[in-house]
Amino acid sequence: MREVCSLGPAYAEGAVELYTKLQQHNKAIREMVGFAGVARYTEEGNTRSHFRRPTIPLSERLAIVEAIAEEYHKGNLTTVIQKEGEKKEDTKQFTDENKEEKK
């Protein structure tokens, strides 16, 4: 997850969108299915596990990728794809203008 987000701000924003949609999906299934949904998903949209915690919950994954995306937004991170010979100024910084272009 962190490796993919380190590829650039677009990947980090994509991860935020993915985990947000997954949480919304799980919450909707929980409401629509009734008892079976409550047994399978928590109120936050995380998958419920009865024996052990097999993966990082969606809410934690979402928090991690949101923090990474915020760091790109502030300009504190550059992409890992940056080559050794490139100057830092050559890397594309994530700004509100880039976000608006995506829409």
Image (tube, helix red, strand yellow):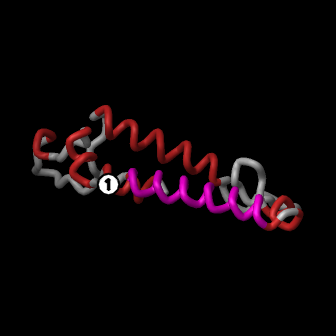
Q: Residue at x 62, y 46 (%)?
A: 60
Q: Is residue 44 visible?
A: yes
Work out whether residue 25 or residue 84 is closer to the camera in this orientation and state it. 25
Q: Residue furthest front?
A: 32
Q: Residue at x 47, y 39 (%)?
A: 67
- Magenta-drawn stretch contains 29: yes
Count residues near mark 1 (Cα–Cα under 10 Å), then give few for <14, some for 14-19, many for 20+. Answer: some
Q: Is residue 51 visible?
A: no
Give the image location of residue 68, x and y in percent: 42, 42
Q: Quadrant of the C terminus?
A: bottom left
89 displayed left or right of 99: left
Give the image location of residue 37, x and y in percent: 81, 64
Q: Which quadrant of the structure image shows residue 27?
A: bottom right
Give the image location of residue 29, x and y in percent: 72, 64
Give the image location of residue 15, x and y in percent: 45, 56
Amino acid residing under circle 1: Ala
Tell me: residue 41, above or below residue 74.
Answer: below
Q: Which quadrant of the structure image shows residue 41?
A: bottom right
Q: Residue at x 32, y 40 (%)?
A: 72
Dominant SS of magenta comes to helix
Which residues make up the magenta segment?
12-32
Residue indicated by mark 1: 10
In terms of secondary structure, where does tag 1 sit?
Answer: helix
Tell me: residue 33, above or below residue 87.
Answer: below
- Magenta-drawn stretch contains 90: no
Work out whether residue 28 or residue 60 is closer to the camera in this orientation and state it. 28
Q: Which quadrant of the structure image shows residue 25?
A: bottom right
Q: Residue at x 17, y 55 (%)?
A: 83
